Amino acid sequence: MNDSENKKQGRTPKKHPYNIRDKKEKKAAYRDLIRPELADDLYDKIMEIIVLQKRYRDADYSAKDLAKELKTNTRYLSAVVNSRFGMNYSCLLNKHRVQDALHLLTDRRYINKNVEEVSAMVGFANRQSFYAAFYKYVGETPNGYRKKHSKP
């Protein structure tokens, strides 16, 4: 049930921590304009650059930078990311950043790093965006996750 339905029925809408909103499903018109073979090729290149080269760790690496590297424009890149990954560019980067942070938060080699340092290591520009993304994907705070999953 969404917030507007709750209001109509006199209920208080569910509050999400860190201003996380429920995802709305929508059919985007641009998906029909994407050439599948080109999109598949771009998908592989995006995975190579973002994941294998770990460009997500660069807080300043923008969709514009990636589009330039792939010799395409940001609108087409955005359409491919949305259709192939089911999320936007920022969410794609944040997903990989959080996955990396999960490892670093429990790795004994990084036990002396505080959460803000881990956040910077994986590419988040600030603490708030890290906490919001981490909570969105993991369902708890980075500190809570570290305490729960650290090995003595």
Image (tube, rainbow, N blue to C red):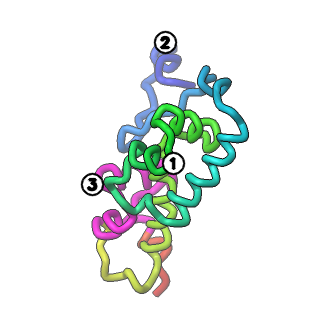
Other residues around mark 1 within 10 Å, as few (<14) / some (14–19) / many (≥20): some
Q: Is residue 114 above or below residue 131?
A: below
Magenta residues, dominant SS class = helix
39 with respect to 139 (left or right): right
Depth check: give the residue in front, 98 or 15: 98
Residue 126 tag number: 3
Q: Is residue 120 visible?
A: yes
Instruction: Name the residue nearer the viewer: 56 or 12.
Output: 56
Q: Is residue 120 above or below residue 27?
A: below
- Contact between labelled residues 1 and 3, with CB atoms less than 8 Å apart: no
Q: Of the residues under marks 3 and 1, which one precedes in the sequence?
A: 1
The answer to whether residue 26 shows anywhere in this view is no
Q: Are marks 1 and 2 in contact (CB under 8 Å)?
A: no
* Boundaries of the magenta span: 116-145
Find disc 1 in the rendering and name its residue: 70
Q: Residue furthest top?
A: 8
Of the two numbered discs 2 and 3 on the same chain, state the one appearing first in sequence.
2
Counting from the top left corner in percent of width and height, residue 16 is at 42, 39
Q: Position of residue 21 (x, y in %)?
A: 45, 34
Name the element at disc 3: loop
Residue in the image at 65% along x and 31% along y: 34
Q: Position of residue 107 (x, y in %)?
A: 46, 80
Is 117 magenta? The answer is: yes
Residue type for callout 3: Asn
Cα separation, mark 2 vs mark 3, equals 37 Å
The circle on residue 58 is none
> Label 3 crowding class (10 Å Cα cut-off): few <14, some 14-19, many 20+?
few
Classify mark 1: helix, strand or loop: helix
Badge number at residue 8 = 2
Residue 109 in which image quadrant: bottom left
Give the label, 1 or 2, closer to the camera. Answer: 1
